[in-house]
Amino acid sequence: MSKKLAVVALGGNALLRGDQLGTIEEQEQNTTDTLENLIFLIREGYDLVITHGNGPQVGNILMRNDAGEQMYGIAQMPIDICVADSQGGIGYMIERMFKNVLNKHGIKKNVVCLVTTVVVDKDDPAFSDPQKRVGKIYTREQAEELAREKEWVFKEEVKAEGGFRRVVPSPRPVDVMNHDLIRELAGRGNIVIAAGGGGVPVYIDEKKDVRPAEAVIDKDLASALLASKIGADEFYILTDVPYVYINYKKPDEEIKEFLDYKDALMYLNEGQFSRGSMAPKIEACLSFIRAGGSKSVITEAFKLEDRRYGTKITMEYD
């Protein structure tokens, strides 16, 4: 019997909870608690590829960039370098924590982290309509000055009166570089950490050279694309809610434990899922199923092992 391959996307409180400061001790403990929930997949014979988000971490890197330039004249690094920076740091943490978890359970496996580039289309409409907020909050005067100096684009922050944040494009991923290598490593029983933070955004120019893109890529869409590219059987998104809901936080709120492709697409088109949180996750799951994946699961980071939790999305559900 051949092994199954699963891609598990760590997000939400899998790495950092909203009420925490974000210290390395907090992140390491959250990561350890989450990875404990993956042991049952290994014991059931799954090969694993792990992806992860990087929102708070890359935001901190961008703020360090800004502080370093203002205080010490240190040149700022572009977003692709910041994403690669966060991939390396978070990937190292996940790798080390997973090795310790495996050691605790007496499991001998290699864990390897790959800094992963993800290709976008340089003509994606997102480049002419940047919407993804990154970095710190600036005053109007600071934002206007930076817009003149660096040609950055800013939008006003609703939650911070008079504050502005930089916005960058978030194009759709079209390819994951080295996906064949990721599949080969995972197929040999290695646990692979890849495509962190949606991957380092790049595009291919007219000469077929790889060029950096000043953008960020949705990590769930990139994870789903990677899962499809490597022929994964199952795709898991770990977040901060145990199920997908319709009519969320309304009197008629309803848990959806099982969804087929048709119904999930219908609810998405009806606007049941928030564009800033659940909608991209549903889109990612549907793209994986559409490409031939057998099952997607969305659940809370610390409840994956408990099969009573989680919304399972398949092409058809009997």
Image (cartoon, rainbow, N blue to C red):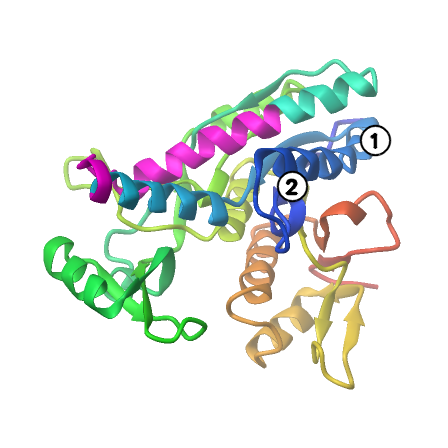
- Kindly identify the amino acid type of the residue bearing the numbered disc 2: Val
Residue 10 pos. (x, y %): 62, 44
Q: According to the image, label 2 marks what residue?
A: 8
SS for tag 2? Answer: strand
The label shown at residue 139 is none
Q: Quadrant of the N terminus?
A: top right
The residue wearing badge 1 is: 44
Quadrant assignment, res 309:
bottom right
Give the x, y percent position of residue 101: 75, 24
The majority secondary structure of the magenta stretch comes to: helix
Left or right relative to 224: residue 130:
left
Q: What residue is drawn where x is 56% and y is 72%?
A: 274
Give the magenta-colored segment's residue range: 70-95
Residue sitting at x 49%, y 48%: 56
First in sequence: mark 2 or mark 1?
2
Magenta segment: does it hold 76? Answer: yes
* Secondary element at image label 1: loop
